[in-house]
Image (tube, coloured by chain):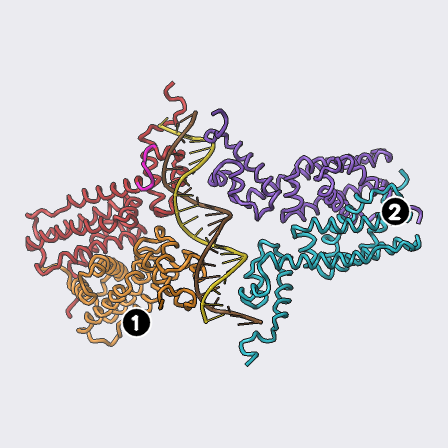
Chain colours: A orange, B red, C purple, D cyan, E brown, F yellow
Amino acid sequence: MGQRGRKKGASGEESRALLLTVAAKEFATHGFYKTKISDIVKEANVTQPTFYLYFQNKEAIFQELVDSFRDRIFTLTKSSKLDSDIASENVPDKISAGLANIFTFFNENSDLTRIGFFMAPESEEIKRQLAWQIKMNLDSEVENGYFLPSLDTNLFSEILVGAIERLTITHLFQGKDTPENLAVHMVRLFLYGVGRDY
Amino acid sequence: MGQRGRKKGASGEESRALLLTVAAKEFATHGFYKTKISDIVKEANVTQPTFYLYFQNKEAIFQELVDSFRDRIFTLTKSSKLDSDIASENVPDKISAGLANIFTFFNENSDLTRIGFFMAPESEEIKRQLAWQIKMNLDSEVENGYFLPSLDTNLFSEILVGAIERLTITHLFQGKDTPENLAVHMVRLFLYGVGRDY
Amino acid sequence: MGQRGRKKGASGEESRALLLTVAAKEFATHGFYKTKISDIVKEANVTQPTFYLYFQNKEAIFQELVDSFRDRIFTLTKSSKLDSDIASENVPDKISAGLANIFTFFNENSDLTRIGFFMAPESEEIKRQLAWQIKMNLDSEVENGYFLPSLDTNLFSEILVGAIERLTITHLFQGKDTPENLAVHMVRLFLYGVGRDY
Amino acid sequence: MGQRGRKKGASGEESRALLLTVAAKEFATHGFYKTKISDIVKEANVTQPTFYLYFQNKEAIFQELVDSFRDRIFTLTKSSKLDSDIASENVPDKISAGLANIFTFFNENSDLTRIGFFMAPESEEIKRQLAWQIKMNLDSEVENGYFLPSLDTNLFSEILVGAIERLTITHLFQGKDTPENLAVHMVRLFLYGVGRDY
DNA sequence: AATGAATGAGAGTTCATTCAT
DNA sequence: TATGAATGAACTCTCATTCAT
């Protein structure tokens, strides 16, 4: 019979992890309300009580996914702060690399991203925190003379988040562009603008 | 007898309109799933069967709100196409005016906007259509030499939508900025970029 | 078809009252936990949601029955306080009459009594309140010289409640004795004791 | 290897006894339905399957506790039958001693008593058997001339059980009175009554 | 003697929706 | 035009109980 149908004797952690993965996919695909516990457990090949062995309720597993997303995205972005002694000519590349990291993370964790960035009640809050981190970066870059002091970093950081969000959905998740490409495009656009000699 | 038993001062159309308004507020505040028909009718001071007198079901009234948003935003944006004989130096102002129109519409219809732009399953599609309209504008502006041909209008239009979306939530709906201000800021930023002499 | 099967159009209060009656019987017969909402509604010929139209949940309907019992038994006993100008030789009859009232009430509301006096978590409390009322009566009777001051009214009132409780179950509810008979017996026993000339 | 993997110091009988004790406490405190097997085993520091090693199911362990109570209370009361050659003047003391024995047993086995005397479905039956034993005693005492033949021993025995029951809960279990005190009080009251010269 | 992991069976509750009037 | 009353159809969650080791 081999592995097929193995149920008894599976390690608890395995079941838990499986449920998390499956739930992420279901939530990402159908949203919180249309996703039923019965769907999740069916997909994970366990029964409903098993679900409650590992998670308090439907909210709890969703929350765990959201928290996981939040933790990871913040860990990621915290590390991308520019060093203050960086050479001016390298700034764009550095920024671009930071953006690429975000896009890459989103790309490799699309279910989690859909959940934490687009469906959770806390999505707004998460985006705002991300914007705030970006703003902090921008502020210190202004201080270091990389950007003009007239730059409204508050507004700009929000715009950047909006751009990231939109490109993630329309280009990244559609497979139309690589993380690196998107990052480069974004940087170029924002650094030099679209204008010319008006 | 006529008026006997009629809800005081409520013609059929009035009830219907009231339900739509109330529903918009409820949906915008609590989302589709957490909004119960019983909440809507309570707030509108009618009974549940009355609701079904005017709307086929919960989806239908939501859809009607979404459609209304979609229609109005497209009517609005369709009109803001730049004329091809516009003087170069006026382009920024024109673009800015178009943006301001959108922000104003969002601001004056925040419930509807929340529903159609942020909660509906079709929100994605609506944004994409908005992006497409913007792209069409951009393309013709490139053709007219306002912008460099190297501009990736596809990507840029998505970024603009992302920026609009984010600023709407974080600045406009919070009352931090007027539609006009936001429009001007955005245009300046995108036209000239944030960069300097790298 | 006549009345048979009439469902739509029944008055709400009727349904509610019916549910209360049926629930009382079910609870009294099977206890709180073994009584299922599905049993109650089946017996009342309505569906489960109808139950929730009138009661918040299973606890609530049980509580309502308990409260009803509590209110009625207290109203009843409050009225049976002896007047202070009563003639000594009439005291036994008066007391007997008061007891008979209680037994009669229990007899005519046996389901409610089983619930409020024997099954509810508050049964203890209810009995204690009943005992307290009896004690108050006894105290004033001691003061008026009907009873010896050496009487421990506290203990005695509890004993009376115990006697009432037990006779209700073993004699009254079994139909072995009438309320009046039980009352008379009890009074005789407690007034004169069982002893003789030890 | 022997001891390997064995729960430290726990022989089978020990685990079983522990489970019984813990279960008694849980049942006595929370009642049958609110007591979960998971609670019992948690408190006893064993796992659920271990529980089923010693007891067939939830009912079985509860029943065992009830039976234990029943056996012991009957053994106890059987022994307290008055000898027929006892001197009249000693009868009250003898009766008092019998009552004190019961109260003492209840006091020392309060969990068991709560279960067997107040919560079990058989509680009624147990009380009735106790009443019957008391009645037998009373009957023979009537026969021996200790009590008047007019005494309704059937009713009286039930009243005694009711008194015992109530005092157990309100005085004994509250620590307000010792078993002996309660016994003496009860005997005095029932022998001589509360009355005077009506 | 003991356990980690799992489940069968069902209970309560909710909500959109519809009769009958 | 409107409503009081009722329901079909789910869905989440719980608990006693058992397998495989």
Asked if residue D186 is among those painted magenta in the image, a careful observer would answer: no
Read off the residue under disc 2.
D142
C176 with respect to A143 (left or right): right
C144 with respect to C113 (left or right): right
Q: Position of residue D110 (x, y in %)?
A: 70, 59
In the displayed structure, A169 sits above or below A14; it is: above
Three-letter residue code for mark 1: Ser
Asked if residue B58 is among those painted magenta in the image, a careful observer would answer: yes
Three-letter residue code for mark 2: Val
Compare residues C25 and B64 and report the one nearer the observer: C25
* Residue C143 sits in quarter: top right
* Residue A89 sits in quarter: bottom left
Q: Where is residue A183 in the image (x, y as percent from the top left)?
A: 20, 65
Residue occupying the point 68% across, 55% down: D116
Q: Residue A79 carries which label?
A: 1
D15 with respect to C46 (left or right): right
In this rendering, the label closer to the viewer, 1 or 2: 2
- The stretch in magenta equals B53-59
In the displayed structure, A194 sits above or below B126; it is: below
Compare residues D84 and B39 and report the one nearer the observer: D84
SS label for mark 2: helix
Compare residues C155 and D28 and report the one nearer the observer: D28
Residue, far front: A1
Q: Position of residue C56 (x, y in %)?
A: 51, 43
